[in-house]
Amino acid sequence: MKKKIITTLVILGLAIAIPTGVMYNKELKAWNDGYCITCDNELEYFDVKHLKPNRFKYTWYCNNCHHIEQFHFLFQ
Ligand SMILES: [Zn+2]
């Protein structure tokens, strides 16, 4: 019985951790060290939106080509 609960918790943990990890890697690539992927200009921090507890959306803006990039993680 106890083993079953632990297995369930591990599966639940993985179900949360894997999509978050995939999203993080995808956004890390788009973040491109803070430089615009279109014109290589340095991105400027623009806005943050509070979606739900522990979930934010950070908006970065390129004032050269007006490209907007949004992330769920705060990259610096
Ligand atoms: Zn740009």
Image (cartoon, rainbow, N blue to C red):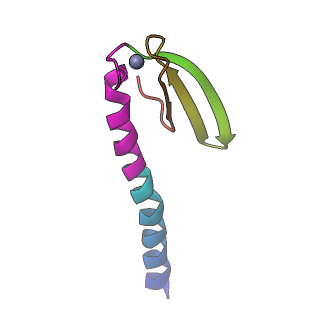
Image x and y of residue 36, in percent:
37, 21
Which residue is drawn at the image coordinates 44% and 16% (left, top)? 65
Ligand 1 sits in quadrant: top left
Residue 55 sits in which quadrant?
top right
Can you name the residue that lies furthest to the front here?
65
Q: Hey, which quadrant is residue 64 in on the image?
A: top left
Residue at x 51% of width, y 38% of height: 72
Examine the structure image and report whether residue 38 is included in the region drawn in magenta.
Answer: yes
4, 60: nearer the viewer: 60
Rendered location of residue 10, percent (x, y): 42, 70
At x 35%, y 24%, the residue is 38
Q: Return the x and y of residue 9 as percentages of the image width and height.
A: 48, 71
Which quarter of the image is occupied by the C terminus? Answer: top left
Q: Which residues are magenta?
A: 22-41
Among all residues in the image, which is located at the extreme top?
Answer: 64
Q: Would residue 66 be found to the left or right of residue 76 on screen? A: right
Question: What is the magenta segment's predominant secondary structure?
Answer: helix
Q: Nearer the viewer, residue 10 or 35?
A: 35
Q: Residue at x 67, y 35 (%)?
A: 50
